[in-house]
Image (cartoon, rainbow, N blue to C red):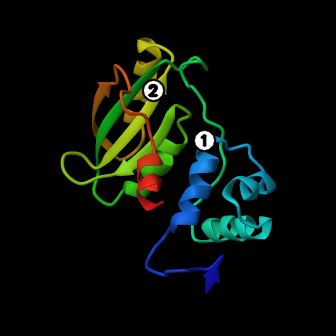
Amino acid sequence: MVFDGQAEHSDQAVDGLDARLLLLLTDEPRLGVLECSRRLGVARGTVQARLDRLVARGVLTGFPPALDLAAMGYGLTAFAVLEIAQGRRQEVSDGLAAINEVCEVHATTGQGDLFVRVVARSNADLQQVIDSIVDVPGVQRLSTSIALSTPVPPRVRPLLERIR
């Protein structure tokens, strides 16, 4: 299949035009398809087809707004390493998903079974969040570290810039 004279490579998840489109939307997520096509110098239909393909392949998963959790009152971020009972990862994950302050959960190798990012309004609030996590059936042990700062925030820009 060919898009704008560029062969689509099935072994490459994102090509140069995809990367430029994703960088544009990373910087300005409210841009419309027409404005993206104008800035990229390609047809509107090309941009729409690329977006549709990126969504269908699971590369582009949505357009959520960037939120400052501290500005929303959740100024404390902590990371918890959980040890869980064997064979109960899904049950524990479901229990963690029911706790509003749990922002993400990763199954890991090494020490612990799950790596969890949580937010809280204060140390006392963090204690309540920890208590809620410990109460999830299947959680055997929890170790928590409080984040003091975020010198490198979540990012994808360097990966996209490598492709362009």
| Residue 8 appears in the rendering | yes
Determine which quarter of the picture holds residue 54: bottom right
Q: Is disc 1 placed on a helix, strand or loop?
A: helix
Viewer-closest of 40 and 57: 40
Left or right: where 5 falls relative to 75? right
Viewer-closest of 2 and 89: 2
Task: Report crowding for label 1: few under 14, some 14 to 19, many 20 or more residues within 10 A (C-alpha).
Answer: few
Left or right: where 39 falls relative to 1? right
Alpha carbon of mark 2 to alpha carbon of mark 1: how far? 33 Å
Left or right: where 114 falls relative to 90? left
Determine which quarter of the picture holds residue 1: bottom right
Q: Which mark is residue 129?
A: 2
Q: State the residue position of label 1.
A: 27
Determine which quarter of the picture holds residue 50: bottom right
**Residue sticking out furthest to the bottom:** 1
Residue type beneath disc 2: Val
Viewer-closest of 90 and 137: 90
The x, y position of residue 103, in whole percent, is 50, 38
- In the image, residue 27 sits, relative to residue 132, either above or below, namely below
Residue depicted at 68% across the width and 64% down the height:
51
Left or right: where 13 falls relative to 149? right
Q: Earlier in the sequence, mark 2 or mark 1?
A: 1
Decide: marks 2, 1 in contact (CB < 8 A)?
Answer: no
The x, y position of residue 113, in whole percent, is 28, 50
The x, y position of residue 34, in whole percent, is 80, 56
Residue type beneath disc 1: Asp
| Residue 156 appears in the rendering | no
Q: Is disc 2 placed on a helix, strand or loop?
A: helix
Mark 2 vs mark 1: give the one in front.
Answer: 1
